[in-house]
Amino acid sequence: MLNKHAGIIATGSYVPEKRLTNEYFEQIVDTNNEWIVSRTGIEERRVAAENEATSDIATKAALRALEKSGRTAEEIDLIIVATVTPDMAFPSTACIVQKNIGAVNAAAFDVEAACSGFIYGITIAESFVSKGAYKNVLVIGAETLSKIVDYTDRNTCILFGDGAGAAIISEVEEGYGILSSYIGANGSAGELLTQPAGGSRLPASEQTVRDRLHYIQMNGSEVFKFAIKIMGEAAEKALSMCGMKKEDIDFLVPHQANTRIIDSAVKRLKISPDKVYVNLNKYGNMSSASIAVALDEANEKNLLKDGDVVVLVGFGGGLTWGASVLRWKNSGGKQHV
Ligand code: UT7
């Protein structure tokens, strides 16, 4: 049986209302706006309300993508939620989204690949759709990182924000869609970025709470070095898998962690900065939601033209990384939200 061609037919996103500016962080930790902007590029980030969980914002992003896709919830065969901030250990956030949107015919599971999660999700979805196993797969990257950020740690608290982005992967015409996807991992460097407690290694206890072990811990400069190296490498690897070179890239949607990391990837890939989508000034690092939200915004702003070679590339905890090469096709049905 011939493989089908799988592609993104619709995108959607949602970010919570509440904003935290750099000035807010000047009040709570020893930092300043100048340091944050010059070292990271971040000006503000969104944070979920106290009663707002990852599935709530994932559901909003999913409904927006679904509406634009022209598919009904019943037509979704599989839901994949990429997140490191699930509502709870189980049931999966994907199952909660399935209930919320009424996708009664869908299988559902979560993927945990930190900031590379959306690319991992797309890679899995492409495989199911191209083999003909499923027709419509909903992939969501969603995070409420504010729930696990240590707001006493200036090294990390200024970096992260909350948000959700979604994409529907379905069959597309030949020559379009996901041309290649490359994912990788290096578990031996996993200690560089962790949330140490709350799992089976260190179950929640009064001591783990006292020791602040339920919050993100990161060796920022080591992650930075890894990111600089892997962004260009992963993008070039995915391009080579579909017989392309960096010169073929029309538009780049990188993981939004730090403008200095994005700038180094731009330099290595020799792409003009106006072909690179950057929104981390508004949202900070939303882990698995970053690429998904950026892709939806670029799509909504009509920055992606039919036939464009669009590269998504990211890296994150695990350590993990991934890149996808898409031949873009606007399928209409855009709506400005
Ligand atoms: O999505 C994957 C997740 N993580 C990342 O992508 C993060 C990757 N890493 C980074 O983006 C950067 O490493 C950071 C933005 C986290 C830090 O930037 P850096 O240029 O690597 O700074 P650094 O860690 O080498 O720290 C330089 C100095 C330190 O002071 P000393 O020890 O030199 O006196 C830090 O304590 O900057 C200090 N510093 C701050 N100063 C003011 C760290 N955070 C802050 C802060 N405000 N918020």
Image (cartoon, helix red, strand yellow):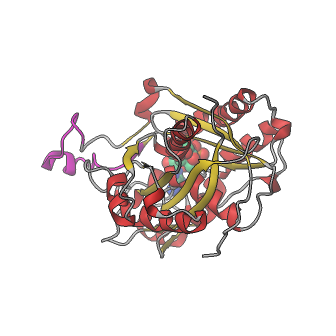
Tell me: 333 left or right of 206: right
Tell me: 219 left or right of 178: left
Q: Which residue occupies 55% across, 41% down?
A: 129
Quarter of image, res 44: bottom right
The residue sitting at the left extreme is: 206
Residue range in magenta is: 199-217
Q: Which residue occupies 49% across, 38% down?
A: 133
Q: Is residue 220 above or below residue 136?
A: above
- List x then y, in percent, for residue 48: 40, 68
Q: Nearer the viewer, residue 36 or 273?
A: 273
Q: Is residue 250 above or below residue 72?
A: above
Q: Nearer the viewer, residue 262 or 182?
A: 182
The N terminus appears in which quarter of the rendering? Answer: top right
**Predominant SS along the magenta part:** loop
- List x then y, in percent, for residue 186: 49, 26
- List x then y, in percent, for residue 72: 49, 64
